[in-house]
Image (spheres, rainbow, N blue to C red):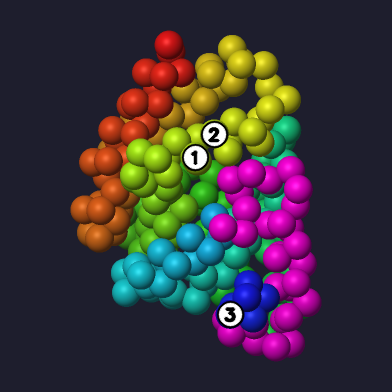
């Protein structure tokens, strides 16, 4: 099943045009990590963790939109992605309450710090951050791809900015929130992030 068919299975054939646009966005040439491959990985993990969500389909819709707008030279991509979701989903037959839920979830991926009672937010954030708990080779490929997306940033500035983001993640009480994700990813993710920080400082 290709990506657009995957979208249609979720949102219905009347929303195919939205899936086509989203597919195109994740295929933009400036993307190196925030690509179709990342989207598929997030969607797959949302499916695995769906039992922990209150509204799994809202989480799936939010996953589709969470990086729909991605410009490495801007700091408001999550906000812009959320606005895009609000605009595009308003043209569907989804109830307004569901659209609002999706928009809120997309915005949540800016900080990855869902409330304890936010079951949907916990699933989406876990799926989005799962790359942090990847094996060392895949994590290295991820960090290299992110660096390529920020190729316009001088090395010293990039290292400082990246270290600030990583230290912010380490300061969270937990990187992962669902039991499965916490067991599978938490320990290795913290090790990966700490190792990257050492390399950035080197």
Residue 96 in view, yes or no: no
**Of pointers 2 and 3, the one earlier in the residue sequence:** 3
Q: Position of residue 21 (x, y in %)?
A: 77, 67
Distance Cα–Cα, label 2 vs label 1: 5 Å
Mark 1, secondary structure of its residue = helix
Identify which residue is drawn at 46% across, 53% down: 128
Q: Residue furthest bottom?
A: 13
Residue 85 in view, yes or no: yes
Q: Does the CB distance between marks 2 and 1 fall below 8 Å?
A: yes
Q: Quadrant of the N terminus?
A: bottom right
The stretch drawn in magenta includes residue 12: yes
Reading the image, the residue beneath label 2 is 144
Q: Depth check: 17 or 119 in front?
A: 17
Q: Does the CB distance between marks 2 and 3 fall below 8 Å?
A: no
Q: Position of residue 30 (x, y in %)?
A: 74, 43
Mark 3, secondary structure of its residue = loop
Reading the image, the residue beneath label 1 is 141
Identify which residue is drawn at 47% across, 22% down: 163
Query: Is residue 82 toward the left or the right of residue 111 in the image?
Result: right
What secondary structure do most residues of the magenta stretch adopt?
Answer: helix
**In which quarter of the view is residue 75 placed?**
top right
Distance Cα–Cα, label 3 vs label 1: 26 Å
- Magenta residue span: 8-37
Identify which residue is drawn at 63% across, 75% down: 2
Determine whether 18 is above or below 36 in the image. Answer: below
Q: Quadrant of the C terminus?
A: top left
Reading the image, the residue beneath label 3 is 1
Crowding near pointer 3: few (<14 within 10 Å), some, many (20+)? few
Crowding near pointer 1: few (<14 within 10 Å), some, many (20+)? few
Identify which residue is drawn at 40% across, 26% down: 196
């Amino acid at each position: 099943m290709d990506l657009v068919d995957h979208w249609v299975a979720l949102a219905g054939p009347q929303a195919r045009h939205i899936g086509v646009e989203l597919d195109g966005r994740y295929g933009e040439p400036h993307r190196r990590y925030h690509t179709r491959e990342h989207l598929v990985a997030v969607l797959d993990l949302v499916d695995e963790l769906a039992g922990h969500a209150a509204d799994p389909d809202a989480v799936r819709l939010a996953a589709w939109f969470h990086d729909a707008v991605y410009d490495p030279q801007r700091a408001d991509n999550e906000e812009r992605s959320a606005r895009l979701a609000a605009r595009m989903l308003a043209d569907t037959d989804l109830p307004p309450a569901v659209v609002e839920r999706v928009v809120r979830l997309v915005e949540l991926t800016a900080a990855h710090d869902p409330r304890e009672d936010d079951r949907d937010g916990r699933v989406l954030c876990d799926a989005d951050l799962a790359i942090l708990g990847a094996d060392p080779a895949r994590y290295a490929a991820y960090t290299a791809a992110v660096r390529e997306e920020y190729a316009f940033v001088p090395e010293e500035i990039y290292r400082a900015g990246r270290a600030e983001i990583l230290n912010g993640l380490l300061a969270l009480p937990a990187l992962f929130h669902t039991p499965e994700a916490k067991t599978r990813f938490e320990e290795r993710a913290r090790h990966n992030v700490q190792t990257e920080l050492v390399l950035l400082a080197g």
